[in-house]
């Protein structure tokens, strides 16, 4: 994110891609930037900043797309993508290096923390996926099933 890093379990990240502008398909949700073709399937692309009521720059040379595995049991959304800044870095966390931050969380954050004295956000991925499902439920989507087969 532009304002503060996100802490996401590495198991949630399926792939990191160079940024390409998503195909706009969801005019009623400015935070849902559109769809991206990924491995033969269209997956929705989210601006976490917009959904969390922050600012989002449309394009930066450091933008990347993080393709995310779903955390819920919804087969309709096995993958989705999130715009990120730079290349995500793996971290090994030690309890003593993480402490609660005192500032208020945004609507899509579970927690705000200080990681080695750097402000960071822990997103509510389950809620994020619910929000995506609410919007895309009215649209017909090709999705990749867990087996790798395509279906609608």
Image (cartoon, grey):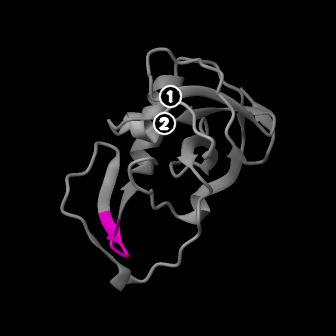
Disc 1 crowd rating (10 Å Cα; few below 14, some 14-19, many 20+) is many
> Where residue 64 appears, x then y in whole percent?
63, 45
Quadrant the C terminus occupies: top right
**Residue at the location (52% across, 23% down)?**
137
Tag shown at residue 32: 1
Left/right of residue 42 with respect to residue 82 in the rendered view: right
Left/right of residue 127 with respect to residue 33 in the rendered view: left
Considering every residue shown, the one lying at the far top of the view is 27
Q: Secondary structure at mark 1?
A: strand
Left/right of residue 99 with respect to residue 145 in the rendered view: left
Disc 2 crowd rating (10 Å Cα; few below 14, some 14-19, many 20+) is many
**Which span of residues is magenta-colored?**
113-118
Residue holding disc 2: 47
Q: Nearer the viewer, residue 111 or 118?
A: 118
> Where residue 98 appears, x then y in whole percent?
34, 76
Q: Which numbered disc, 1 or 2, marks the residue that appears first in the sequence?
A: 1
Q: Any magenta on residue 75?
A: no
Q: Secondary structure at mark 2?
A: loop
- Give the distance between the C-alpha atoms of the residues marked 1 and 2, in whole angstroms: 6 Å
Left/right of residue 7 with respect to residue 59 in the rendered view: left
Label count reads 2
> Where residue 141 appears, x then y in whole percent?
66, 24
> Where residue 145 appears, x then y in whole percent?
72, 41
Please determine whether, in this image, residue 121 is positioned above or below residue 92.
Answer: above
């Amino acid at each position: 994110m532009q304002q503060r890093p996100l802490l996401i379990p590495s198991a949630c990240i399926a792939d990191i891609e160079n940024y390409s502008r998503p195909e706009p398909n969801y005019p009623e949700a400015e935070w849902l930037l559109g769809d991206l073709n990924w491995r033969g399937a269209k997956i929705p692309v989210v601006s976490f900043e917009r959904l969390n009521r922050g600012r989002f720059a449309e394009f930066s040379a450091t933008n990347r797309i993080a393709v995310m595995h779903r955390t819920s049991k919804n087969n309709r959304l096995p993958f989705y993508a999130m715009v990120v800044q730079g290349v995500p870095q793996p971290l090994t966390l030690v309890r003593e290096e993480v402490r609660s931050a005192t500032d208020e969380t945004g609507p899509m954050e579970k927690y705000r923390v200080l990681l080695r004295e750097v402000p960071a956000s822990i997103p509510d991925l389950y809620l994020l996926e619910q929000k995506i499902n609410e919007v895309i439920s009215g649209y017909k989507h090709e999705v990749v099933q867990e087996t790798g087969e395509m279906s609608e």
